């Protein structure tokens, strides 16, 4: 298990990360506060075209998806 990719993200943060993965700009993400938190964690970055997911954010999203499925199954 890679501890550097284990993040305890809130539901809003997971949703924002998933939205950024699909190319949503910060204006289309439901929680700009969640995006700010993702930027602070290094999982997202803000540029001239808005927020985007970082390579680390993409890895966290892929790694965390199995935990999200466990939550749904519970």
Image (spheres, helix red, strand yellow):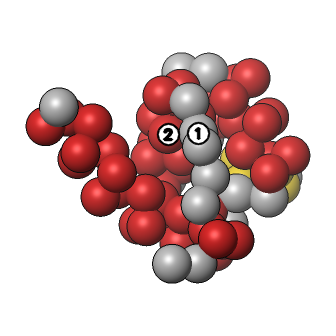
Task: Answer above or below: position of 44 versus 68.
Answer: below
Residue 33 rendering spot, x and y as whole percentages: 74, 23
**Residue 14, which numbered label?**
2
Answer yes or no: do the residues labelled 2 and 1 have beta carbons within 8 Å?
A: yes
> Of helix, strand and loop, which one carries label 1?
loop
Residue 16 rendering spot, x and y as whole percentages: 54, 37
The residue positioned 70% from the left and 57% from the top of the image is 43
Label 1, on which residue? Answer: 9
Task: Answer above or below: position of 44 versus 72.
Answer: below
Q: Is residue 17 left or right of residue 42?
A: left
The residue positioned 71% from the left and 54% from the top of the image is 44
- Residue toward you, 49 or 72: 72
The residue positioned 53% from the left and 72% from the top of the image is 59
Q: Is residue 38 left or right of residue 25?
A: right
Q: Do we see residue 53 in this rendering?
A: no
Q: Quadrant of the C terminus?
A: top left
- Residue toward you, 47 or 60: 60
The residue positioned 32% from the left and 45% from the top of the image is 68
How far apart marks 2 and 1 lie (CA) works out to 6 Å
Within-10-Å neighbours for mark 2: few <14, some 14–19, many 20+: many
Tell me which label, 2 or 1, sits earlier in the chain.
1
Task: Answer above or below: position of 41 versus 55.
Answer: above
Q: Which of label 2 and label 1 is nearer to you?
A: 1
Residue 29 rendering spot, x and y as whole percentages: 55, 30
Residue 34 rendering spot, x and y as whole percentages: 68, 29
Residue projecting furthest to the left: 73
């Amino acid at each position: 298990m890679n501890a550097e990719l284990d993040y305890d993200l809130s539901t809003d943060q997971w949703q924002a990360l998933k939205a950024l993965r699909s190319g949503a700009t910060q204006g289309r993400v439901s929680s700009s506060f969640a995006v700010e938190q993702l930027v602070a964690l290094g999982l997202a970055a803000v540029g001239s075209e808005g927020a985007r997911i970082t390579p680390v954010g993409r890895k966290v999203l892929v790694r965390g998806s199995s935990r999200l499925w466990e939550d749904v199954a519970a």
